[in-house]
Image (tube, rainbow, N blue to C red):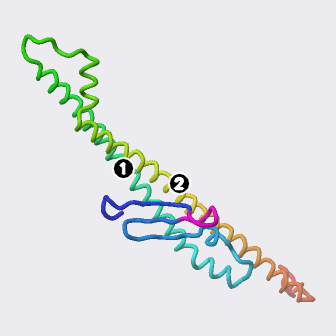
Amino acid sequence: MGKLGDKVVVKNEGPGLMRVTVQIGPRRFDEDLAAQAMIRPDVQSLNEAMATNPSRFAEWAMLEALAISECDAISGQIKRLDTDVKDREARAYLEIVGAVPVGQKPPTIPEITAMVQTDASRVELVRRRQELDAALLDSEDSKRKLSVGRKTMEERKESLLALASNWRKEMDGKLAAGIKDTSQFKPGGRA
């Protein structure tokens, strides 16, 4: 994934639902999934598609893996921030209660709660957590879109194999149709 600060960003840009732009750190990938999934109906295109499909699948799978890693990293940061928020709330409570002079009436629970909630350090931690929540939503969206790309390349492989098989049967049929006496090709047909 590179440095922890690398970000996977997926956007639908321009015409077409299947246009995906992915940025990982400084590298940008602009993919047209519809164009990659298309199979032209000729033998040369089939051969080319079969040759390039493994690398296209690997690219989508790697991008998806990077998005999954980013989701995991952000989730870990959120968990750490949740702990930091709870720690700050506990410290703020102790500071508030400890600041009450002896013999003076302590603040009420709602007043203490309000003071803890508005503690500047706690507010900053909560703001950071909200940013991470938004980043996690974006990252999960990226992960889903990249998963579609990977699955599309898997389906494309199956389609390529089926198309190649069909064309082979068709070619075998054309070759067999040109032979008048096929008895020599049948099992047991030779004398």
Q: State left or right for residue 182 relative to residue 88.
A: right
Seen from the viewer's position, the closer of residues 96 and 181 is 96
Q: State left or right for residue 88 relative to residue 50.
A: left
Residue 131 is situated, as x and y percent measured from the top left of the image, at: 37, 47
Residue identified by numbered label 1: 74
Q: Residues within 10 Å of mark 2 (few under 14, many from 20)?
A: some
Residue 47 image-quadrant placement = bottom right
| Residue 42 in the image: above or below residue 1 | below
Q: State left or right for residue 91 relative to residue 5.
A: left
Three-letter code, disc 2: Arg
Three-letter code, disc 1: Ile
Residue 100 is situated, as x and y percent measured from the top left of the image, at: 11, 19
Residue 41 falls within the magenta-colored stretch: no
Residue 18 image-quadrant placement = bottom right
Query: Could you tell me which quadrant the C terminus lies in?
Result: bottom right
Residue 16 falls within the magenta-colored stretch: yes
Say which residue appears at 55% left-offset and 64% top-offset: 20
Q: Are marks 2 and 1 in contact (CB under 8 Å)?
A: no
Residue 4 image-quadrant placement = bottom left
Please state the extent of the stretch shown in magenta in the rendering.
13-20
| Residue 82 in the image: above or below residue 68 | above
Say which residue appears at 56% left-offset and 64% top-offset: 13
Seen from the viewer's position, the closer of residues 11 and 149 is 11
Query: Could you tell me which quadrant the N terminus lies in?
Result: bottom left
Residue identified by numbered label 2: 144
State the predominant SS element of the stretch in magenta.
loop
Say which residue appears at 20% left-offset and 16% top-offset: 107
Identify the element where label 1 is drawn. Answer: helix
Q: Earlier in the sequence, mark 2 or mark 1?
A: 1
Residue 123 is situated, as x and y percent measured from the top left of the image, at: 28, 37
Identify the element where label 2 is drawn. Answer: helix
